[in-house]
Image (cartoon, rainbow, N blue to C red):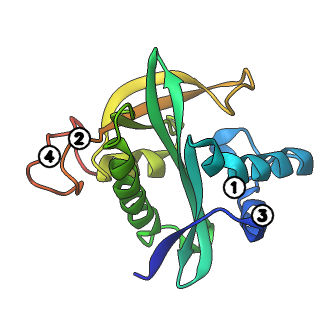
């Protein structure tokens, strides 16, 4: 698969607009207004300069297929890395999210080696988002349980999510036989 991650840039706004549909945003509160979308785009552009993370466009054969990110956040008294992703409908079910997730995990593992970096990568898919929850399991995350999660951050809006955690000090590849069992069987 010819998949690569490209840091978010001005042209990525068109990808963000493709993601901003009722189908794609079903599990996260629905589409955003143009003003909200432009504010989100500006946050994504500024994220690397903050030193707190990076948003990536997922390219398949050079064409936008989705997005994936990591960023630092405080969660239950601990600083963690958080990740989230979107894959456009035309590319779903073809392994794009798994390839992008594995590539992102490799990036975050490198960053986690720096002194003072968080040691855990969390994902918080809606409890009703079966494909994203299955992806977490496939990538080697451990299901910690359901939680109320504020999304978007600072909005005051809570969604019922699953808290998945990946130990960034663990084996480098999620299918490594030496990795600890996640407690959840592969789907």
Residue 46 in the image, given as x and y percentages of width and height: 71, 49
Question: Mark 2 or mark 3: which is in front?
Answer: 2
Separation of marks 3 and 1 at Cα, in angstroms: 18 Å
- 183 sits to left or right of 101: left
Q: CA distance from mark 2 to mark 4?
A: 11 Å
Q: CA distance from mark 2 to mark 1?
A: 35 Å
Disc 2 or 3, which lies upstream in sequence?
Answer: 3
The answer to whether any part of residue 50 appears in the image is yes
Q: CA distance from mark 2 to mark 3?
A: 34 Å
Q: Secondary structure at mark 3?
A: helix
> What residue do we see at 56% from left, 40% from top?
52
Q: Which mark is residue 169?
A: 2
Q: Residue furthest toward the left?
A: 178
The disc, 1 or 4, on the residue closer to the chain's N-terminal end is: 1
Q: Is residue 152 left or right of residue 145?
A: right
Say which residue label 4 marks.
179
Q: Is residue 25 visible?
A: no
Q: Quadrant of the N terminus?
A: bottom left
- Mark number, residue 13: 3
Give the percent coordinates (x, y) of residue 128. Answer: 52, 38
N-terminal of the pair, mark 3 or mark 1, is 3
Q: Residue furthest front?
A: 115
């Amino acid at each position: 698969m010819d998949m690569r991650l490209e840091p978010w840039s001005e042209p990525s706004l068109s990808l963000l607009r493709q993601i901003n549909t009722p189908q794609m945003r079903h599990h996260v509160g629905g589409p955003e207004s143009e003003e909200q979308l432009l504010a989100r785009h500006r946050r994504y552009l500024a994220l690397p300069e903050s030193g707190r993370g990076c948003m990536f466009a997922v390219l398949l054969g050079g064409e936008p297929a989705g997005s994936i990110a990591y960023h630092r956040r405080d969660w239950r008294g601990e600083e963690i890395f958080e990740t989230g992703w979107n894959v456009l409908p035309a590319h779903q079910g073809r392994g794009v999210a798994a390839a992008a997730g594995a590539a992102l995990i490799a990036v975050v593992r490198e960053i986690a080696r720096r002194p003072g970096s968080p040691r855990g990568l969390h994902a918080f898919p809606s409890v009703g988002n079966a494909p994203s929850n299955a992806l977490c399991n496939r990538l080697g995350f451990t299901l910690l349980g359901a939680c109320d999660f504020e999304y978007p951050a600072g909005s005051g809006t809570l969604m019922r999510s699953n808290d998945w955690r990946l130990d960034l000090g663990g084996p480098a590849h999620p299918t490594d036989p030496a990795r600890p069992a996640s407690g959840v069987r592969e789907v």
